[in-house]
């Protein structure tokens, strides 16, 4: 997992959003704010939050609709945070893909507890991993320092672009999983990005050239024909 979880707050009540943002950042989260559905879409093209706090009544539409769109491309955890408190509202929010529902006004302590709990259920421990070593084949050892965003191959630093690093970490976090190209683009580049599969293929090639012992015969990032890619390592410490 990455060292700092990013939480998107989608709410047109700016004062409340800032209050929640301050709480989360005081507890070692990164936050990004959107006050409308349009602004949320613009941000989701550029980044992949680890959790979304979503209001229902927004100035340009309904949070339910945004959640339904999200569920077509991602399983990012969503907590509805709304002044709509009826049982029907809660049932609809959960039925369309929300993971939790918190009625306004709410306790900041309870909100933080629900965020922590949902992140633990989704990703495991919320504590950052400072470093890890993986072995690829007989002769390649790759070390990833997630706090410093430093990658080494056989003790020598490897220079990666931000997207190369994000893609590498995603592969490591989903070892042995066959990942489709569409899924990788959604998760690494953003849910509503217009990145083409060719861009993903180029980044995979660059990673292979920088990390594989023999990029023409990859042992680390393997192609799964007709699907996408799979990360394979011999050992992970």
Image (cartoon, grey):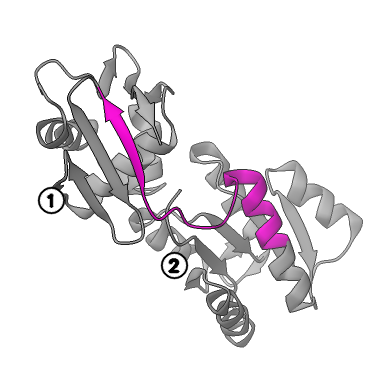
Q: Which residue bears the numbered disc 2?
A: 39
**Residue 63 x %, y %:** 63, 59
Q: Is residue 123 magenta?
A: yes
- Tell how many labels: 2
**Considering depth in this image, is 15 or 194 the residue closer to the camera?**
15
**Considering depth in this image, is 89 or 190 the residue closer to the camera?**
190
Q: Is residue 34 magenta?
A: no
Q: Which residue bears the numbered disc 1?
A: 159
**Residue 7 x %, y %:** 53, 64
Quadrant that contains the C terminus: top left
Query: In which image quadrant can residue 38 be found?
Result: bottom left
As helix, strand or loop, the secondary structure at mark 2 comes to helix
Q: Which mark is residue 186?
A: none
Segment colored magenta: 114-136
**Considering depth in this image, is 116 or 20 the residue closer to the camera?**
116
Left or right of 71, for residue 225: left
**Residue 167 x %, y %:** 30, 42
Q: Residues within 10 Å of mark 2 (few under 14, many from 20)?
A: few
Residue 194 seen: no
Query: In which image quadrant can residue 83 be found?
Result: bottom right
Residue 217 seen: yes
Q: Is residue 84 above or below residue 180?
A: below
Q: Is residue 43 above or below residue 32?
A: above
Ranked by sequence position, the earlier of labels 2 and 1 is: 2
Q: Residue furthest top?
A: 225
- Tag in front: 2 or 1: 1
Q: Which residue is at a point 72% across and 69% down the rendered structure image?
A: 111
**Residue 134 x %, y %:** 32, 34
Q: Which residue is at a point 53% across and 37% down the rendered structure image?
A: 72
Q: Which residue is at a point 11% across and 37% down the rendered structure image?
A: 210
As helix, strand or loop, the secondary structure at mark 1 comes to loop
């Amino acid at each position: 997992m990455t060292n700092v979880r990013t939480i998107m707050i989608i709410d047109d009540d700016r004062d409340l959003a800032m209050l929640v943002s301050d709480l989360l950042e005081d507890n070692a989260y990164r936050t990004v704010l959107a006050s409308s559905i349009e602004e949320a879409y613009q941000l989701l093209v550029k980044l992949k939050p680890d959790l979304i706090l979503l209001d229902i009544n927004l100035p340009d539409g309904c949070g339910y609709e945004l959640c339904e769109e999200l569920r077509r491309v991602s399983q990012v955890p969503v907590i509805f945070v709304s002044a709509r408190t009826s049982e029907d509202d809660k049932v609809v929010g959960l039925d369309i893909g929300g993971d939790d529902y918190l009625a306004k006004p709410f306790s900041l302590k309870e909100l933080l507890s629900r965020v922590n709990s949902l992140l633990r259920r989704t990703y495991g421990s919320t504590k950052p991993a400072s470093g890890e070593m993986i072995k690829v084949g007989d002769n390649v050892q790759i070390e990833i320092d997630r706090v410093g965003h430093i990658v080494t191959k056989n003790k020598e630093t490897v220079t990666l672009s931000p997207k190369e690093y994000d893609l590498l970490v995603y592969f490591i976090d989903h070892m042995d999983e066959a990942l489709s190209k569409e899924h990788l683009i959604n998760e690494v580049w953003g849910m509503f990005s217009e990145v083409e599969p060719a861009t993903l293929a180029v980044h995979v090639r660059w990673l292979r050239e920088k990390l594989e012992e023999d990029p023409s015969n990859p042992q680390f990032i393997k192609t799964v024909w007709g699907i996408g890619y799979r990360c394979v390592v011999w050992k992970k410490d």
